[in-house]
């Protein structure tokens, strides 16, 4: 039986967790899990993994603690790590403790888009297709052999939000494939990556949101539309005028929608103050 330590968070991580729990059978068992216990701190405002862990030993991921992972691997005889949107870089000791039998699910093509913010950069770079990658974890971030890839088209009116949604489904397809292989004791491929690629830091898009000319208007309005994060903007005096893509209409954000107005009314009510004379 394969004994899995699952590390994950975020919408994709939570969906993968649900798939993993449903897949558990006589050949695969989750023996420990590491995720966020709070729903208030993270931007996705959810802690569904923590809430559904039940009697499975749980490790809080708010602060990096490799020793807790090592202790769990030893205590529960974990032999496989599945990592989905986990915030820690795993140490050599942790990877070695499962003989490097560890797979990460990265929502980008590797090694071209190592690190963060791939959906934003892919649109800014005017890529025509996107790739999600399941890869073996090694000592260097996002540089292990590829196991599987999910490839799909980036449309001409793609936004960061719509591309993120595609990644969600593409990543889950990869996760299902890996689960099937693990559960049936099938060999998972090792496909060496070619080239060094590029690493994008967590803050790689912080200085790119400003629209500096009409030639950037369309691409940046799409590349930075992914609530709840800051959109692209044009500076006006000491203020920022935010620019949203026309494709919002295609995504169902109707500018005349009463739902939008109703939410604005509800939100204003919570903080509204006035004096009546």
Image: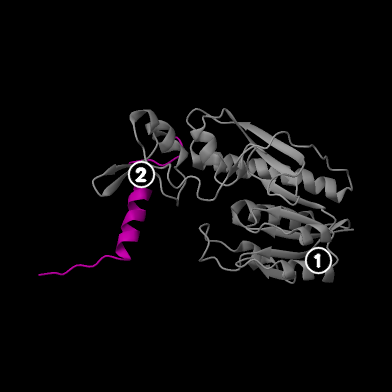
Q: Quadrant of the N terminus?
A: bottom right
Tag shown at residue 90: none
Circle 2 crowding by C-alpha within 10 Å: few under 14, some 14–19, many from 20: few
Residue 21 horizontal/vertical position (percent): 75, 58
**SS for callout 1:** helix
Which of the marked residues, 2 or 1, is nearer the chain's N terminus? 1
Let me know if residue 276 is in the magenta part: yes
The quarter holding residue 231 reads: top left
In front: 60, or 25? 60
Classify residue 242 as left or right of residue 192: left
Q: Which of labels 2 and 1 is toward the front?
A: 1
Q: Residue at left 85%, top 56%?
A: 99
Residue sticking out furthest to the left = 277
Q: Is residue 15 visible?
A: yes
Colour scheme shown: one colour
Q: Residue at left 32%, top 50%?
A: 261
Residue 169 horizontal/vertical position (percent): 64, 42
Query: Label 1, on which residue?
Result: 73
Circle 1 crowding by C-alpha within 10 Å: few under 14, some 14–19, many from 20: many
Q: Residue at left 73%, top 33%?
A: 194
In front: 277, or 7? 7
**SS for callout 2:** loop
Q: Are marks 2 and 1 in contact (CB under 8 Å)?
A: no
- The residues tagged by marks 2 and 1 sit, at their Cα atoms, a distance apart of 51 Å
Let me know if residue 197 is in the magenta part: no
Magenta span = 250-277
Query: Label 2, on which residue?
Result: 257
Q: Residue at left 67%, top 65%?
A: 52
Residue 174 horizontal/vertical position (percent): 72, 42
Residue 201 horizontal/vertical position (percent): 55, 48
């Amino acid at each position: 039986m394969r004994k899995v330590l699952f590390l994950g968070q975020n919408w994709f991580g939570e969906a993968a967790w649900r798939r993993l729990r449903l897949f558990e059978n006589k050949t695969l068992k989750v023996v420990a899990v590491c995720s966020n216990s709070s729903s208030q701190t993270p931007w996705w405002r959810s802690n569904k993994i923590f809430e559904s862990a039940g009697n499975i030993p749980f490790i809080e991921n708010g602060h990096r603690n490799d020793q807790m992972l090592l202790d769990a691997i030893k205590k529960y005889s974990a032999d496989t790590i599945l990592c989905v949107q986990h915030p820690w870089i795993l140490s050599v000791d942790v990877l070695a403790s499962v003989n490097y039998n560890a797979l990460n699910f990265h929502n980008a093509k590797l090694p071209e888009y190592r690190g963060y913010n791939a959906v934003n950069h892919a649109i800014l770079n005017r890529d025509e297709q996107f790739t999600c990658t399941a890869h073996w974890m090694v000592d260097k971030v996002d540089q292990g052999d590829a196991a599987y890839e999910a490839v799909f088209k980036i449309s001409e009116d793609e936004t960061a939000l719509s591309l993120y949604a595609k990644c969600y489904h593409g990543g889950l397809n990869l996760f299902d494939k890996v689960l099937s292989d693990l559960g049936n004791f099938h060999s998972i491929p090792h496909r060496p990556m070619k080239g060094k690629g590029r690493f994008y830091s967590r803050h790689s898009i912080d200085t790119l949101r400003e629209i500096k000319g009409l030639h950037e208007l369309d691409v940046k309005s799409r590349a930075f539309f992914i609530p709840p994060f800051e959109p692209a903007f044009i500076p006006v005096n000491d203020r920022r005028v935010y620019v949203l893509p026309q494709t919002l209409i295609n995504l169902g954000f109707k500018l005349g929608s009463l739902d939008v107005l109703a939410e604005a009314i509800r939100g204003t009510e919570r903080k509204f103050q006035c004096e009546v004379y």
